[in-house]
Image (cartoon, helix red, strand yellow):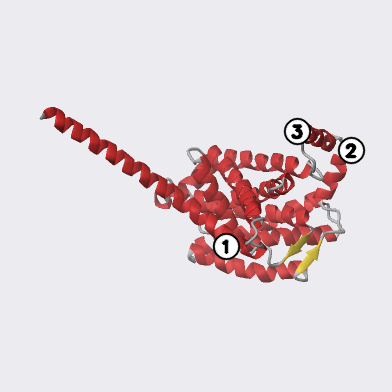
Amino acid sequence: MFSFIAIFGAVESGVIYAIMALGVYLSFRVLDFPDLTVDGSFVTGAAVAGISIMHGVSPVLATLLAAVAGFIAGCVTGVLHTKGKINALLSGILMMIALYSINLRIMGRPTLSLLNETTIFKQLRDFWSGTGLDTFFNGMLAAIGMERFPATWAIVLVMMVVTLAIKFITDYYLKTEIGLALRATGDNQRMIRSFSANTDNLIIVGIGYSNALVAFSGALIAQHGGFADVGMGIGMIIIGLASVIIGEALFGTKTIARATIAVIGGAVIYRIVVTIALRVDFLDTGDMKLITAVLVIAALVAPKMMQTHREKKRRQRKRAELERIKVGEV
C-alpha cells in the first residue's frame, strides 16, 4: 500500500525537479540542441548555493547566484559550439567534464553538508509555522480519515508557485521577438539566418537560460536535501528527458503554454512513479536508473504503438467501406 506521505514527498521533490526539466525542454525541444552540460550545471548550482550559504550569504541570493553560474556554464557550451565550431553533443560533453573539476574547486571537497546551515527552506518553514496553514490543511485531511500528515505544506505549495512563475516567464519569453527567433533557430537555422538573425547569439543565450534553470533547480535540491555532492548530477539529463517525454506523451504539445505545463506534470508524475516503483519488494534504490530507462522507453514506444494501432483501425474501416461500395455496385 502506498502512503499519502510518500506520494506527497514525491510531488514535493517533483515540482523542484520540474524547473530542471523546463531547462532540458528549452535545449532539447526548442533549440534542438542535445546539451549534456546539464549533468554538470546541476551540480554547479548546488555547489555555488551551498558554499555561498556556508559563507554567510543569504539563501535567496545564493540561489540566484547559482542560476547565474549555470547561465555562464551554458553560455560557454554555446560558445564552444557556435564560435569554436565543435559538434553540439561534444560541446556539452566537454563542458560537463570540465564542470566536474570546477565544481570540486568551488566546493573544496566532494560533499558539503547544509544540515546545520540556514537554507531557503528552513526560512520558509519558520515563516510558515506562524501562519497556522499546516493545521488547516492537516485538519482537512483528518476530516476525510487520514491519520498521518505531512510535516509541512510550505515547500510543496510555495515551490508550485515558484515553478509556475518560471513557467509563465518562459512562456512569455518564447513569445517575444527574441523568443520567436529562438524557436525558429531550433526549427530551421538556415531559414532564420536569411532574415538576418544572429543564430549564434540566440543559441548561446538559449543554452545559457536553459542551464540557469537547471542550476537553479540544483541549488534548491541541495537545500531541500541538506547536502551538495559532486556526483549528484549523474544521470540528471535522463531524468530531465524522462520528464519531458512523459509529459508530452500524456498532455500533448500543441502550444508552448501546454508544452511547458506538460513538462511540469511529467516531472511530478516521474517522481511519483519512481516512488511507487521503489516500494515494490524486489526493487531497491540502486534500480532507480533502470526504472528511469524503462519509463523513457515506455513513454517513447507507447505513443508510437497507439498511433500504429489507430492507423491500422483506420485502414480496416476504409477497406470495409470500399467492400460495401463494391457489393452495392454489384
Q: Residue furthest left?
A: 330
Which numbered disc flags the more N-terminal residue, 2 or 3? 2
Secondary structure category for the residue under label 3: loop
Residue 240 x/y as whole percent: 59, 54
Q: Is residue 205 left or right of residue 323?
A: right
Q: Is residue 124 left or right of residue 233?
A: right
Q: Tag on residue 130?
A: 2
- Per the model, the C-alpha gap separating discs 2 and 1 is 42 Å
- Left or right: 3 as drawn, with respect to 130: left
Q: Is residue 227 left or right of residue 212?
A: right
Q: How many marks?
A: 3
Callout 2, which amino acid? Gly
Image-quadrant location for residue 111? bottom right
Residue 265 horizontal/vertical position (percent): 60, 43
Of residues 197 and 38, the one drawn nearer to the viewer in this rendering: 38
From the top left corner, tell me how far across and down residue 90 is, in percent: 51, 67
